[in-house]
Image: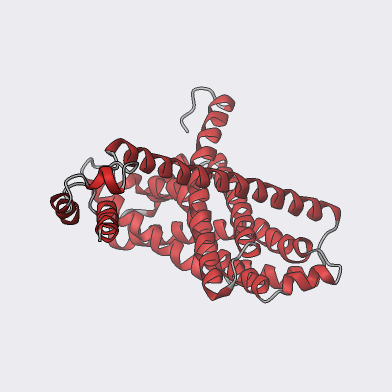
Amino acid sequence: MLLKVYQCFVDDRDMYPWGAPQYRRARRLCPNFMSIVAPNNSKPRIAARITGWFTEWVSDWGELVISSCIALGDFCLFILSTFRWMFSRFPKGETLWPNFYQVGVSSLPVVALTGTFIGVVLALQSSSQLGHYGLTNQLGGVINLTLVRELGPVLAATMLAGRVGSAMAAELGTMRVTEQIDALSAMGADPIHYLVVPRFLACLLFIPTLTIMADFMGVAGGYFYSNIWLNIDQHYYWTNSAKFVNNFDLFTGILKSLFFGSAISLISCYQGFNCKPGAEGVGKAATSSFVFAFIVILILDLSLGLSLKALYESWYPGGTY
């Protein structure tokens, strides 16, 4: 009887540490219950529970940090292997042309359409703000500088990450799940050279073209809205654009796009190569490739912006970046 009561007390005490009904009933039934049945089992203390929670919290964070370091090291080795194969043996045309078409030609419509609407939205939002200060004629410089330096590269990279990066991760993840990548290794072909390098070159070479297309369509959309709806004279629009936008701004956008394209291709291929089994793993690989690529795009945009600003100020002392 006492053993059953004690078991109820222990179970309920774990669930309700203090003031459990079973604990009170056990003490009423047997005043010297703890000293007779469980002399070595004292009530759990708050400090012990807090220590356990803190230890578990530290353990979870430690596991996260260690797994992140392992993944980062594995990703660095993946990048080194990609560059080694790219410079040691150039891929064949039969693997390059399909990727060139998928990354470059197929992405042009969506990038052009998005760039056009971004230019129109910029004109719409900026005109109301500049109109308060009587600077509506300066709208061309604001729109074009923003597009060429920042929005054009980031927009093209985001479209590439969403449309091409996710498709790369899903395709390579499916090949990993169905053991096609293992079959390539068994046949003596290196999967990175055959699958990763063509996709990396396609993103690296074609994202500048997509960036220029986004810039052009954004500038055209902003011009038509400013000229037709806002009645801004085209002379002032293009004169102020030429005054604010220079060759270094165009160079800034293209240089950023090269880094963005490299990051998108490497992250997407890495996620596909390390896909977990099953359809759920393929879906997670496609989702995580876009999320990580977008975060890296923002980090690179900030880092390159600060670096290029310092470079411009060193080349043109006294100039305004």
The outermost residue toward the top is 317
Horizontal side of residue 70 vs 190, given as left or right: left
Residue at point 36% right, 43% down? 53
Residue at point 83% right, 67% down? 189
Residue 217, x across and y down, in percent: 48, 62
Residue 195, x across and y down, in percent: 73, 66
Horizontal side of residue 89 vs 295, given as left or right: right
Residue 74, x across and y down, in percent: 67, 50
Residue at point 45% right, 58% down? 218
Q: Please state which of residues 61 and 121 is positioned toward the viewer in this rendering.
A: 61
Residue 57, x across and y down, in percent: 41, 43
Reply above or below: 252 against 28: above
Q: State the count of labels.
A: 0
Reply above or below: 88 against 55: below
What scheme was used to colour the molecule?
secondary structure
Give the position of the N terminus as an image quadrant.
bottom left
Q: Please state which of residues 133 and 20 is positioned toward the viewer in this rendering.
A: 20
The answer to whether residue 148 is seen in the rendering is yes
Residue at point 29% right, 58% down? 3
The outermost residue toward the left is 28
